[in-house]
Amino acid sequence: MPKEEDEELAMEINYLKKELEISLQKSNFLENENQELRQELGRLKSQIQSLKAHNNERKSILWKKFHSSMDVAVAGADSRPPSPAAAAGEKRETTKSQKQSSWGDVKENQRMMVAPALAPPPPPPLPTKLLGGSKAVRRVPEVLELYRTLTKRDAQKENKATHGGVPTVAFTKNMIGEIENRSAYLSAIKSEVETHGEFVNWLIKEVEAAAPRDISEVERFVKWVDVKLGSLVDERAVLKHFPRWPEAKADALREAAFSYRDLKRLENEVCMFRDNAKEEVNVVLKRAQALQDRVEQSVSNLEKTREFNSKKYQRFQIPSQWMFDSALPAQMKLSSLRLGKECMLRITREIRSIETPQAENLFLQGVRFAYRVHQFAGGFDSEATVVFEELKKAGLSSQRK
């Protein structure tokens, strides 16, 4: 009887162990799914804020253009109207001047320019004793080992700072309706459709024929088109009267140019990041973490939409090579190494300069951030490896005291 009871008890224990394992697996799966949903939610919120900001900017421009058109209309009412012949001559002169600067002429002038555009100043170099060696990135197993050791010892999770969204300008639907319903605004649109027809048809041919060689030429072409359309009271309202306007291609060109520009600005912001000795170490670390959040989210968004956008861009003869792993995403991952090196250097100095009970927690934060950058960039270069070894030496030395 005792043996049978022992066997039943052992079977029950094994059953409970299996149930526990299954529950743990389910829990891990749900945690991972929850984390992915949070990242997706953050990405969608970022896109919504960006679209709202862009929409409000366009609406504010529309509001200014409407006021300027009203001022012109009032001034025109006080003056004597020109004769039909003079008006026709003025229209021909305007169209002629607009056509004189085609996109082909602009590209030729840009090639003739000798003086290159001024580049932003390079970021300050790291200490000379840390320089030298290969710039190649490689995996550093010590980073993973130290990270796992410290996180097992201290399971406390790092609190991520939440950033409030930038408040958008209030612009109610009633105000939009008031603008669109004004007869002066509608008459201005009608007048521009009639007087700018030849100009818009010429611009349609320019957009349809556009085949930029690289993404920088896409940026220049979009800027040129926006300047040409800037003379209109309301670009969308006028262009919708021209069925041949290649709206899909124009929007794709703008989307590619704006995406590339935003990513390059972010990369430049990362490269210009520097430690401020007057700021507390936690403030510096939070700044770096917030910037790393933006870099990782931007690269992730680019990778998620890359396949769809690359097909769309190829259909419209828009370069898409900059989107792939060996191009801009790789540059942004390498630039994030600067954030890791700056933070590791600052934390190393803090640990060595003062004896504080917070040194262990500071060491843990530095290792976690180093591990995060290491995983994102695909490894460390020689400089980052040296900086990490210094951090490891200082942190372990403080723990022995």
Image (spheres, rainbow, N blue to C red):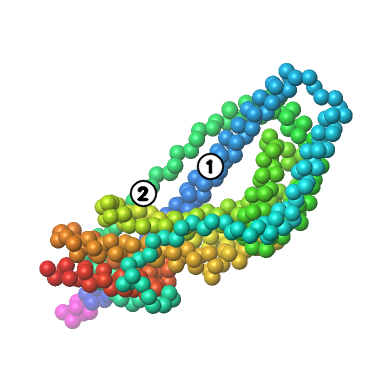
Q: Residue 71 location, x and y as percent?
A: 66, 24
Q: Residue 79 location, x and y as percent?
A: 75, 19
In which quadrant will I find the C terminus? Answer: bottom left
Residue on which the image places disc 2: 162
Residue at the (17%, 71%) spot, across then down: 397
Quarter of the rendering containing residue 323: bottom right
Residue at the (47%, 63%) spot, across then down: 332
Residue at the (43%, 68%) spot, across then down: 377
Residue at the (73%, 18%) spot, across then down: 78
From the viewer's perspective, is residue 41 above or below residue 317?
above
Helix, strand or loop: magenta stretch: helix
Q: Secondary structure at mark 2?
A: loop
| Drawn side of residue 3 relative to residue 192, left or right | left
Q: Secondary structure at mark 1?
A: helix
Q: Residue 353 location, x and y as percent?
A: 18, 62
Q: In the depicted view, which residue is nearer to us: 213 or 34?
A: 213
Quarter of the rendering containing residue 76: top right
Q: Is residue 155 visible?
A: no
Q: CA distance from mark 2 to mark 1?
A: 20 Å
In this picture, which residue range is highlighted in magenta? Answer: 1-7
Q: Tag 1: residue type?
A: Lys
Q: Is residue 96 visible?
A: yes
Magenta residue check for 6 = yes
| Drawn side of residue 74 relative to residue 119, left or right | right
